[in-house]
Amino acid sequence: MEIDLIKRNELIDLKNKYKNILLNNVIPFWSKYSIDWEYNGFLNYLDQDGSVYCTDKSVWLQNRGLWIFSKLYNEVERKEEWLNIANNGFKFIMKYCFDTTDRDGRMFFSVTRDGKPLRKRRYYFTETFGVIAFAEYAKAANNQLALEKARTMYQLIIDQYRNGLWQDYPKVNPRSRLTKTHAVPMIILATTQCLRKIDNNPLYDEITGMVVDEIFKDFVKEDEHALFETVGINGERLDSPQGRCINPGHAIETSWFLMEEGYCKNDKNLINKACQILDWSLSWGWDKKFGGILYFVDIESRPLEQLEWDMKLWWPHTEALYATLLAYKLTKKDNYKIWHKRIHKWAFDHFSDKGYGEWFGYLHRDGSISLNLKGNLWKGPFHLPRALLLCWKLLDEMQK
């Protein structure tokens, strides 16, 4: 059926394009410039040409780098280079990225090149990336220690989540205003899905069910056609810039997590509701004047707190590439094919660096380049290679 709607040669061409860009452009960029063979781990502050402009290391990206190279080894080719890179990352993370003085099981947020701690954050996002990295590496290296560490970190995260202690202390005084963010159930859903593919535990289905329910009960507002980023502690809509804010990229990313959960559990209703979130988020986020996906949107078109609201960042576009393709496969609806082509063209026309490879990460609203960098504290070998790999493998399934 898919081949009837997307011509077979078009499908094959698109699959080969994603595969080629991943294996011959994106991954070679990171494997050439990011790997720190002297101190281990990954150097993530990379300029346009791959040169290092800061040697501090983001622990998010230590974890994400370990995940992608382990994933490539597990699902693309058992290539010794990729396993060596993963081993190199695992060694650094184990030695330097956990706070052993506090004995709380937590990870640092950033460290120096040689592993001295710099920052530790209030919240547990770093640990969620640690879970997926260690789980994927455990499979690649047949390393039981890594799997046990993934399980331990996961249990810590879930205990904190269930106790309402996602962060060590709240950003806003809870006696004045109790809020919660969609990013928490979203990341727990994604983390659990990744761990469930490697490890067998009935807890994982229980947790995915719990966070899916929370997303729809508290963050999805059907009457406003939106998934909100921040709500009151019981899901109340907040009349403030924070409460009116939509993060289209996050909502789009959540939509494909939900689609995959629906597919995993053969729940067509969940798939349909996930696609509805995708529809709304594309409608809110797509810039009708310049094209591309806006970073933040106020649902009432009132002023936003985020000064960068109208920028175009790389990662919402990578998430939209996979979300629209997955929605097309699962529903056979032609509008998702149209959206995929539109996003694909805009993203590759504006983010791709034809000179040095990889993607620019930060554009102005009109699509012109804001920063030439390829890596920083947040941007590394994750969103783009993940999307390329997922799209390639999905198109391969659709072709069969």
Image: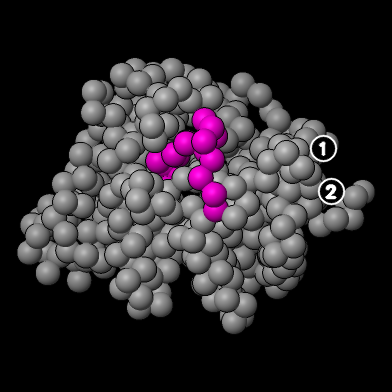
Which residue is more in the foreground, 150 or 17?
150
Q: Position of residue 306 (x, y in %)?
A: 52, 25
Which residue is more in the foreground, 305 or 351?
305
Q: Which mark is residue 117?
A: 1
Determine which quarter of the picture holds residue 136: bottom right
Q: Position of residue 2 (x, y in %)?
A: 15, 65
Disc 2 residue type (three-letter): Asp
Which residue is more in the foreground, 199 or 24?
199
Q: Is residue 306 above or below residue 384?
A: above
The residue stretch that appears in magenta: 235-251
Is 243 colored magenta in this rendering? yes
Q: Which residue is mark 2?
A: 99
Q: Are marks 2 and 1 in contact (CB under 8 Å)?
A: yes
Is 273 colored magenta in this rendering? no
Tell me which residue sits at (90%, 50%) in the image.
Answer: 102
Q: Which mark is residue 98?
A: none
Disc 1 residue type (three-letter): Pro
Tell me which residue sits at (43%, 54%) in the image.
Answer: 220
Q: Position of residue 344 (x, y in %)?
A: 25, 40
Mark yes or no: residue 125 visible: yes
Q: Image quadrant for the C terminus? A: bottom left
